[in-house]
Image (spheres, helix red, strand yellow):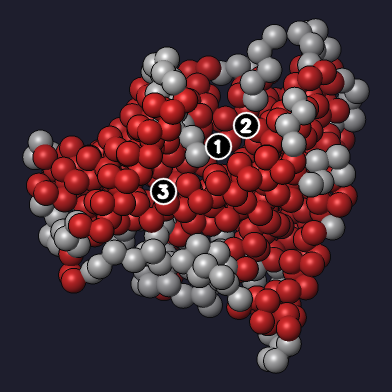
Amino acid sequence: MNKRAFSLDALRGYAIITMVLSGTIASGVLPGWMYHAQVGPRSNFAFAPSFYGITWVDLVFPFFLFAMGAAFPFSIGNKLEKGESKLKIAWDCILRGFRLTFFAIFIQHMYPWVTSSPQDVRSWLLALSAFVLMFPMFMRIPVKMSRWLRGGIQLSAYMLGVFMLLTVSYANGREFSLSYSNIIILVLANMSIFGSLAYLFTANNKWARIAILPFIMAVFLGSKTDGSWVKDLMNYSPIPWMYSFYYLKYLFIIIPGSIAGEYLKEWLQNRTEAASSLEEKRKIPLILLLTTGVIIFNLYGLYTRQLLLNLCGTVIILACIYWLLKTRSNNMDYWRKLFVAGAYLLMLGLFFEAYEGGIRKDDSTYSYYFVTAGLAFMAMIAFSILCDIYKYRRLTRPLEMAGQNPMIAYVATNLVVMPMLNLIGVASYLTYLQQNAWLGFLRGVIITALATLIAIIFTKLKWFWRT
């Protein structure tokens, strides 16, 4: 039986595709809930932390972080099961974090609008060249060769990348800087190191892993006191262009994700092809409907600030899901574990909602961490049903394939799709798709579909970027 976690691939793929979509839809013409809650039309599209609530756009990054954490039991856990030393695994985790940091710096400097303003043929060709160069950097070349030759090719690619960074002429007088990097990838690099190490040394004790979080919270709360060693710890960074204690706040999403990954791995190991009972078959559509519904309901209630209605409605929906999951079976037992953890975090987040003024992504609040982590557990249940029970391959397969190649999917828009559309003279027509909301959304769908297609093509070729 195939033990690959297709539902986890699909969740990761959903997160990366919607991340691309949210960055490509037309600005200024869509309803407020189509943008980050703090930068929509309510604030005239300027960042305003005084606006609270979340939208679907505010879920995509925490969902990706959650999926990253859920992969630890498979990537790190499998190495532990094979007998690899923790010291070697820890070193690999640190190296992966540094490679991701290089990725964050490299792509940020190679974006067309960074190398030229206005963008021109040179900037588009540079972007395409950077995309091609990252294959020997991050892909295992599918040709039999010696370890030294393979390492030499990879090192040469990195050296050429560094040469590009140092010699390229940037727009508006900008110069190369280690501090100029893609913030999303930089956060992932930090989580790759600290989240991996947290899992590595608590792989057999999830409660010890959870026990890390109150200390992280204590530093954030205590750092507000001037002169305290806690504030010094919060502000200290030996490599400020890479690490900040502030990034560790996302462990509140990564660590719950790692627990979901353990539940998933256990389920895969014990899974059989036995047919579901009639009672289970009747309940599964309702479980899918309600786990999806509780996500949508909370987005609506929190964005519109109908907080009491949202709290009461969430309690009712969670109670219904709990009742539906009472049936005993391998699938139901797995979903029930996800549900209990997710329901707890979601309710905790709703009780934290009033703290720090209200839930928001930037600057992120504790309510944001707990609510989004709780909703990610619900999404795991929904994707498990879609991928593993109903097996809607036409719907889920593109998500799974994009989720297996997230690095390519993330950069394809700005390093491939837009440069190519500009080079062939088609990009100018996209401006016509900014006249109204429907066309503005269609613009994002077209660009996102092209970026997703690129990721799918390389996944089919088994050309994966890995750090």
Question: At 68% from the left edge and 17% from the top edge, which residue is drawn?
Answer: 3
In the rendered structure, are the residues bearing label 1 and label 2 in contact, judged by CB atoms less than 8 Å apart? Answer: yes
Asked whether the viewer can see residue 436, the reply is no
Residue topped by disc 3: 103
Residue 8 numbered mark, or none: 2
The label number, if any, that marks residue 12 in the structure image: 1
Near-viewer residue (325 or 300)? 325
Circle 2: residue type: Leu
Where is residue 305 shown, x and y percent of the image? 61, 66
Relative height, residue 149 to residue 196 (above, below):
above
**Comes first in the chain, label 3 or label 1:** 1
Q: Residue furthest front?
A: 148
State the CA–CA distance, disc 3 to disc 2.
Answer: 23 Å
Q: Nearer the viewer, residue 224 or 363?
A: 224
Q: Quadrant of residue 96?
A: top right
Q: Amino acid at mark 1?
A: Arg
Label 2 SS = helix
Q: Quadrant of the N terminus?
A: top right
Relative depth, front residue between 196 and 341: 196
